[in-house]
Image (cartoon, rainbow, N blue to C red):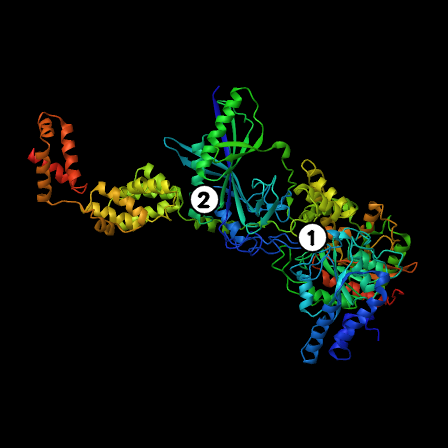
Amino acid sequence: MELFKLTIHELHEKLVSKEISAKELAQSVFSRIDDVEERVKSYITVTRDVALAKADEIDKKIAGGERIGPLAGIPTAIKDVMNTEGIRTTCGSKILDNYIPVYTSTAVKNLLEEGIVMTGKTNMDEFAMGSSTENSGFFVTHNPWDLERVPGGSSGGSASVVAADEAIFSLGSDTGGSIRQPAALCGIVGMKPTYGLVSRFGLIAFASSLDQIGPFTKDVTDCAIVLNHLIGHDINDSTSVKIDKPDYTKALVNDLNGIKIGVPKELMAEGIDSKIKAVIENSLKLLEANGAVVAETSLPNIEHSLSAYYIIAPAEASSNLARFDGVRYGYRVPDAVDLIDMYMRTRAEGFGDEVKRRIMLGTYALSAGYYDAYYGQAQKVRTLIIDDFNRAFTDYDVLVSPTTPTTAFKIGEKVDDPLKMYLSDICTIPVNLAGLPGISVPCGTVDGLPVGLQVIGKTLGEEMMLRVAYSFEQSFGWSEKPKL
Amino acid sequence: MEFESVIGLEIHVELDTESKMFCGCSTRFGEAPNTQTCPVCLGMPGSLPVPNKKAVEYVIRTGLAIFCDISLFSQFHRKNYFYPDMPKNYQISQYDIPLCIDGHVDLEMEDYATTIGVTRIHLEEDTGKLLHIGGAGRIAGADYSQVDFNRAGVPLMEIVSEPDIRTPEEAKAYAQKIRAILVSLGVSDCNMDQGSMRVDANISLRPVGREELGVKAELKNLNSFRSLQRGLAYEIERQTKALQNGEAIVQETRHWDETKNTTSTLRTKEYAHDYRYFPDPDLVPMEFDPEWIEGLRAELPELPDERKERYMSDFGLPAHDANLLVETKATGDFFEAAVALYGGDAKIMSNWILGDLTYYLNSENVEIDAGEVKPAHLVEMVELIDDGTISGKIAKELFSEMFKTGKMPKAIVEEKGMTQISGQDEIAKIVDDVIAQNPDAVQEFHDGKERAFGFLVGQAMRLTKGRGNPQLINRLLKERL
């Protein structure tokens, strides 16, 4: 049996009933990796030995009659932006090529304690800056649906790894769409929780006020299961929220009667591919057919999202990335003549072009005399965007839109035109600016390539968001897989 | 032309908390390099700061003690610059909304009183320490450098004064007063040797009567109150000369050299950083309940000014004595302990503490609470004077011995045979001898020369090796002459 094709909830039943062992499952996934990884190139690091040892451990528990949680024994890939103690963590950058963390990020630790079997660390745009994974300091990841195309980014490896069945699920991070956009382009479910719901401790920061960890899964049920174990207040993260942990699987109700769904017209406007629009229109009809009340709404200020984002995110990044200086860890130029020379050449050689571009943008935006005009102004715009969402949510339970303006583009197509690349995240960025939860679910194809439907929830409104996504998924009945 | 100096101080104080500002590492001083570190204070990728509430409380208590307004809403900013002692290459500090603003400190100088405004008090994290190997021990020319991050992340409070200080003496008095307040509050040990209190001074000159400020220099490496005073005095002299010669003062940071007694250029304004301050997105803004702040105010301990008032009203001390006794908390504590043991006139204790004890402590560079002489020593000694066992003169000798050895006064008196000779017969015999052996002086006395009497007393004291009771010698000599 091709166990690697199954979902978390299907595999959990088989493990508990001892129909399969965790070791068989892990071996199945690794055989799949052996089979397709050369073509997809999802992983920067594969941790086969660690995984098999962990699978043995889980099998012993099962054999000993111990109760296991729903994630125990499940082969899981982790975006290489999260610290894993003793396991190389590169953030997709040459500057951390040799970096072995001394601690594990809270999100990964939470899952490890639940018994996940970590298969490896996935490729990404360097420091999560990019929308195609072409900015990786190591290699390009390929979209399993069409190997000539990008998987999206920055969590491209975590998306392709699930789409190609090289892991059962994975973790990514989303600063401006880095989970939802690649999930859409790879035809899987990807979710960014409310800012603060998942601890950022141990997540190598890109833009601290926007970054959030979330799962890539094969369906919405798996997404809810993973979320249950990912969240929780963390004393190590001052921005982490304190709430009673809900059971998100209880929100998976296939019923949309009376649910009010708003469609922001600005996210269905010019710039969205007409074929994608058509797929989304069909999805809206399906939602209506299930009892939802769907209406057009407006978020007038979100047209400024991209501008505000490309001030705020680089500004924070310019400061966050200052620590990569060759003094304590990571790459250091071997023949520096003095301190300044060491700083400059270490960073010049260690960082790629996009990272340098954003550090310069951010440094400029924070400089004396420019702060008010750039960073200060961008923060004001951010407040206006939050107000827009708040207003919309007085009338609607969730908002929906396309996740991306186009389907997966060709490798190399936008790499020389940063502005064009930045536009890939036009539908997802406003959600990060407002700190809201968002999920992308597959809703069809255009020319054989997947399209994602984005469902945006209220602050901490994950349950309603999951209910809408789940109901849509149940009635839409997506079952297509890439042919590899 | 007459110039007036305008001085403002920036005082950095390491707070005496158990753990660091943004992580749980210990703040203990003097441990092996890099043993008190974790991913947070080493700036490892992905680590996040969590503020130390105790440190925030300490700053607010300080603000309350020096009459500041406390911000009910405050925020941490990032101050961005590259330096190897700073793990993240930014320092978490405060910028436009510090915890405390607009306070003041009252100073009593020798013959006038003045008030120094405090602009702000803010909280930040300390940096690590660099050790440069080879060269002159400075970064330029070193073979390589080592970094110790034990200090990185220790809570650091910065107290910024208004440019209200006019003389080096005022600067010293202000810094000492701040230290006395902080030690009374228990927020810092303010140990300048270990760098837990560091003072930088901004100084400029302007013609007397002009409002507008002159070009300033910032003085660094002022490692003691003495170097603060001397560094400023040197700088006033240097700037006065320059201005009188028509030279322009350059805005710069200058380094005080303790051994050469001069200041020299460290860096000029062209190297000024653009720190690119922005609110730290890893930390949520702080909001305080006014009731909590009032609670802190109500719990403030007795501060130096209140203590001084009490010494004047309860012990009848003159303002001069009271002022000096409260200069450090330890001195006041010593005084009060001694008074409590003694039960006699507090002024006598004050005289000994501000006189001999301070003299010996200063000459040996020992802190009062670290010295061998404890309140019990002093009180026992004064009681020996009171009951006539020793003379005041012997007490001076005894004090020196006590300071060196830490032995109790009675033991020293016994060991060295320092008891006063008060026996009427014994003294009478000595007085007779003196009269017999000094007929010339006796004659001079009878001729009306008062000086001769003093000489004869001195001779009697010499014969008793200083142990004779002076009153008795006086009386018997007068009777017999």
Q: Where residue A136 sits: x, y (%)? A: 79, 53
- Residue placed most toward the observer, A453 or B195: B195
Q: Residues within 10 Å of mark 2 (few under 14, many from 20)?
A: many
Q: Where residue B121 sits: x, y (%)? A: 52, 42
Q: Which residue is mark 1?
A: A330
Image marks 2 and 1: residues in contact by CB distance under 8 Å: no
User: Image check: B436 left or right of A372?
Assistant: left
Say which amino acid is labelled 1. Gly
Return the mark for residue A454.
none
Q: Nearer the viewer, mark 2 or mark 1?
A: 1
User: Could you tell me if residue A462 is visible in this image?
Assistant: yes
Identify whether B159 is placed above or below B268. Answer: below
Identify whether A202 is placed above or below A385. Answer: below
Q: Give the position of the C terminus of chain B as an image quadrant.
A: top left
User: Could you tell me if residue A400 is visible in this image?
Assistant: no
Identify whether B167 is placed above or below B150. Answer: above
User: Image check: A190 left or right of A237?
Assistant: right
Total marks in image: 2
User: Image check: A240 left or right of B474?
Assistant: right
Identify whether B265 is placed above or below A475. Answer: above
Q: Quadrant of residue A11?
A: bottom right
| Mark 2 vs mark 1, CA separation in Å | 46 Å
Q: Which residue is mark 2?
A: B65
Q: Where residue A269 sits: x, y (%)? A: 85, 49
Secondary structure under badge 1? Answer: loop
Secondary structure under badge 2? Answer: helix
Which chain letter goes with mark 2?
A: B
